Image (cartoon, helix red, strand yellow):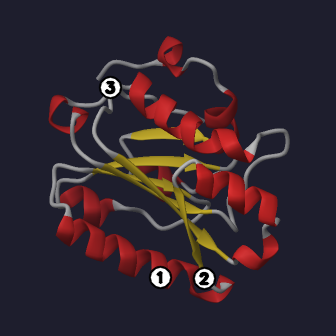
Amino acid sequence: MANYMVAEAKYEKAVTSVWWDIENCPIPKGCKAEGVAQKIRSALSKLNYGGEISIFAFGNMNHIPPSVKQALSSTGVVLKHIHSRKISLHLFTKVLFWTYDNPAPANLMFISRETNSHNKERERGFNILIAHPPYPSDSLVDSANTTWLWKSLLEEPDVTSQTLTP
């Protein structure tokens, strides 16, 4: 399930913050850690998102091999160690503070299997982008302007060939 929407003009140069639940939405088998950040940036660029992009990965980093952490970190992914039970709360808090520091129009990309919608952020003028594993909840997908299947985002060489126009 994917819905590739080209960026609206007001979001094209806006900052994009990527919030990745790396524990519940890990790097798929066959994908290289050192290529994840570039694939995310490329997918956004192909849909005309040209502003500054920051990527934060949250989760229990004790379960991630040091070589994977090093590869991600070396490509600009900021790793945040969070105990499993606190990921949702921590993510909610960090996103809330980020949105106050970066008012709309701005882009929020979530890489997650969470079932929570992001309608509140949307109502405040933020553009919501979501990469998810198979079988996401309807509320999660419905809260986003653009969605990707997480694995296909990392494998897809050219998403623009599948772009839908608004």
**Which element type, helix, strand or loop, lies under badge 2?**
loop
Q: CA distance from mark 1 to mark 3?
A: 30 Å
Residue at horizontal 27%, vertical 47%? 15
- Which one is in front, 106 or 129? 106
- In x, y percent, where is residue 41? 47, 36
The amino acid marked with disc number 1 is His
Question: Dividing the picture into quarters, in which one does residue 156 lie?
Answer: top right
Q: Quadrant of residue 120?
A: bottom left
Mark 2 sits on what residue? 82
Q: Which mark is residue 48?
A: 3
User: Within 10 angstroms of label 1, few (less than 14), some, or many (20 or more) residues?
Assistant: some
Give the percent coordinates (x, y) of residue 63: 80, 73
The quadrant in which residue 117 appears is bottom left
Q: Residue drawn at (70%, 68%), measured in percent from left and top? A: 23
Which residue appears at 60% of the width and 82% of the height? 82
In this view, 95 is above or below 124: below
Q: Quick one: quadrant of the N terminus?
A: top right
Q: Position of residue 72 (x, y in %)?
A: 64, 54
**Mark 1 and mark 3 residues within 8 Å of each other at the beta carbon:** no
Towards the viewer: 79 or 159: 79
Q: Which mark is residue 16?
A: none
Q: CA distance from mark 2 to mark 1?
A: 8 Å
Numbered tag placed on residue 90 in the rendering: 1
Earlier sequence position, callout 2 versus callout 3: 3
**Label 2 close to label 1 by CB (< 8 Å):** yes
Q: Is residue 144 left or right of residue 8?
A: right
